[in-house]
Amino acid sequence: MTIELIPAEQFTLQELTDLYNQTRVDYLVPMPMNASRLGEYVHDFDIDLSQSCVARVADGQMLGLCMLGVRPKHAWITRLGVLPATRRSGVGSALMDCMMENAGKLGAKATQLEVIKNNLPAYNLFSCKDFIETAEYLVMRRAPHPSSEPPRGNVHWLDSDRALEAIQSYPNHLTWINAPDSMRNARDVEGLHITLQDGSSGWLAYRNTKFTLRSTLSHLIIHTEQGNPAQVGKQLLLNLHTHYAHHDTYAENIHKDDPHLPAFYAMGYFENFSRIEMICAK
Amino acid sequence: MAKILYIEDIKDNITLVQKIVTSRGHEFMSAENAETGLEMAFNLHPDLILLDLGLPDADGQTLSVWMRNDPVLEAVPIIVLTAWPEEVVRHTVEAYNLDGYLCKPFTLAELVQTIDKALSKRPS
């Protein structure tokens, strides 16, 4: 089978969405999209469709796709998917090679990606392409429910600019989707800063995404400036969920050793799945 | 006879469930995304909602919150049909105050039993 790699910009968002959804139909965590959401994804995460690829055979039948996020000196491989019937025939490998070549041409010093934990075929493919596991992250959910105690602390709500300033100061590594550039692109970032009675302090930034009818909270970034992260984190989350009492919350890519995890669990978060971040430095 | 709304983005799954639901004499409706599902639930007042978790606009968990927050829909039983690992689904159903789940692949008998059980709890 001869595989052609065509720049994704030659396809409409609807065509890319349809192909992407077909490649994920049998995934453990399928995460389907519509064209509108894919458009937001492309915008928020700096996906360059001219450097992203669709794989197809000569008769035009599409086989799979892969997207490349591009930022200065960094690239991000995402949305890799191959139609179930055409897996194990080199399509994924060809798409990865194309992404790595494009990333290199654009001057990326490092290319990163995330793979769902226990997706061994994908993990093995990335390992073969010299990607090395660097960290494990949790994807967590919280259904809205009444808090068992009143929130404490002196809280200042942060508008988008202040929240982005806080994110910019975050001292630890953030994955691509929570990185300052992604949060800035998203335009729906908010936050809060808290000071507790004992002088402990910290902040929480998040996206408050509006749907047509409702909104939801996601992409949480939490940081303790001073004090015990479990305590500061709990009060940050308690204030957030008291303020947004009816919002569903989706916390993506919380490091598995994040010291705020006890606060998340105390506030009713539970794990949905884990992601492994892998990086290839070339 | 009951009105059953299935919110699911994969057409083959909709067709399969539709056959089972209508063969039991129920009225069947479907929506392929969360926004349409919410709108249909508001307007058509189903007796039972079958919900996929992976939807293309907002996922099933978020949709269930929107429905549970609404006085018209808060009491409508919601059954999750999903391929997610059972432990995660069980936790999700508990946390989101849903009424049950079936993990794919499921048998026709399991689906019928689950629907009958959910509908039997309706106020008479």
Image (spheres, rainbow, N blue to C red):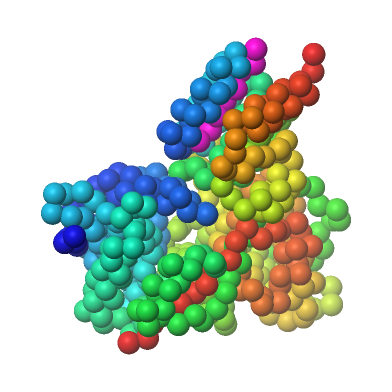
- Residue A235 included in the magenta stretch of the image: no
Note whether B5 is above or below B51 in the view shown.
above
- Residue range highlighted in magenta: B1-8
For this view, does A133 lie left or right of residue B97?
Answer: left
Q: Residue at x 66, y 21 (%)?
A: B47
Question: A49 and A80: which one is in front?
Answer: A80
| Furthest residue in direction right, as rendered | A149
For this view, does A280 lie left or right of residue A245?
Answer: left
Note whether A231 is above or below A79 in the view shown.
below
Q: Where is residue A158 in the image (x, y as percent from the top left)?
A: 60, 63
Q: Residue at x 25, y 61 (%)?
A: A53
What quarter of the picture does the N terminus of chain B occupy? top right
Q: Where is residue A3 in the image (x, y as percent from the top left)?
A: 19, 61
Q: Position of residue B60 (x, y in %)?
A: 58, 42
Q: Which residue is drawn at 42% across and 33% down?
A: B11
Question: A102 and A231: which one is in front?
Answer: A102
Residue B22, visible in the rendered structure: yes
Question: B9 and A200: which one is in front?
Answer: B9
Note whether A233 is above or below B14 in the view shown.
below
Question: A43 and B67: which one is in front?
Answer: B67
Q: Residue at x 71, y 70 (%)?
A: A261
Q: Is the magenta stretch mostly helix, strand or loop?
A: strand
What quarter of the picture does the C terminus of chain B occupy? top right
